[in-house]
Image (spheres, rainbow, N blue to C red):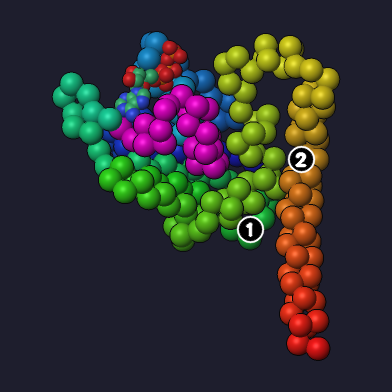
Amino acid sequence: MFLKRIEMQGFKSFADKVVIQFDHDVTGIVGPNGCGKSNITDAIRWVLGEQSVKSLRGNAMTDVIFAGSADRRMVNMAEVTLVFDNSRRDLNSELDEIEVTRRLYRNNGEAQYLINRNPVRLKDVVDLILDSGLGKDSLSMISQGNISSFAEAKPIERRAIFEDAAGVSKYKKRKLESLSKLERTKENLDRTQDILSELE
Ligand code: ATP
């Protein structure tokens, strides 16, 4: 699956609207220390559903919103959109282009998720992305430090990495969801049985 474009506004160091177009199979982003290269990968991870502020190198989720600089006031909202080429139908949609957007407001902490500009739940974004193997925890994003932690990983942790790469993890996640649903259904059945016994 091909990431065609990133659009950002108010995200970390990107106060103004920035559009990064990826026209080639391989793109390198270069720049001096602290210019915002890692903020771009943070933006991708954020839209893919990252909920860990530590992974986003902050202390609170609102730290992703532009906090102001010597010559700019802070802003109230961060918005990032990833535009994917879906002509190969890697994502479960009939559309050739899929836009996934995440927004966060500073004043009330409200989060919004959109797929092709329609409001959705975080779960809808995660489910859409999970099928493509592009999830936030997948091996599609290798951060600084990941390589040494792979090398130092215990066998059980390494197995989880292989399962991610082989696409097994999504089935494990769905199995856990189904088991938890079954458990809830069993509890409801027990409760219904109790009520029935009282009525008899
Ligand atoms: P390096 O090459 O050293 O890894 P980098 O190019 O990857 O650097 P980043 O870590 O992406 O740089 O960007 C760091 C910059 O982003 C810092 O100047 C920091 O002040 C700025 N920054 C991070 N969060 C915010 C925010 N919420 N508001 C404004 N600026 C921010």
Ligand 1 in which quarter: top left
> Magenta stretch: residue 57 in it?
yes
Q: Which residues are magenta?
A: 45-66
Q: Does 30 sit above or below residue 123?
A: above
Q: Measured from the top left, where is residue 191 in percent x and y?
A: 74, 72
Q: Measured from the top left, where is residue 64 in percent x and y?
A: 38, 33
Question: For residue 20, what is the image quadrant?
Answer: top left
Which residue is the extreme one toward the bottom? 200
For the N terminus, give its image quadrant: top right
Instruction: Name the chief secondary structure element in magenta.
Output: loop
Question: Residue visible at 74% across and 12% down?
Answer: 151
Is 104 or 19 nearer to us in this picture? 104
> Magenta stretch: residue 181 in it?
no
- The residues tagged by marks 2 and 1 sit, at their Cα atoms, a distance apart of 21 Å
Is 17 or 156 nearer to us in this picture? 156
Amino acid, disc 2? Ser
Q: Which mark is residue 169?
A: 2
Q: Measured from the top left, where is residue 33 in percent x and y?
A: 40, 11
Question: Residue visible at 45% across and 38% down?
Answer: 6
- The answer to whether the beta carbon of the residue marked 2 is less than 8 Å from any atom of ligand 1 is no
Q: Measured from the top left, where is residue 130 in percent x and y?
A: 67, 45
Q: Which mark is residue 93?
A: 1
Q: Does 1 sit above or below residue 29?
A: below
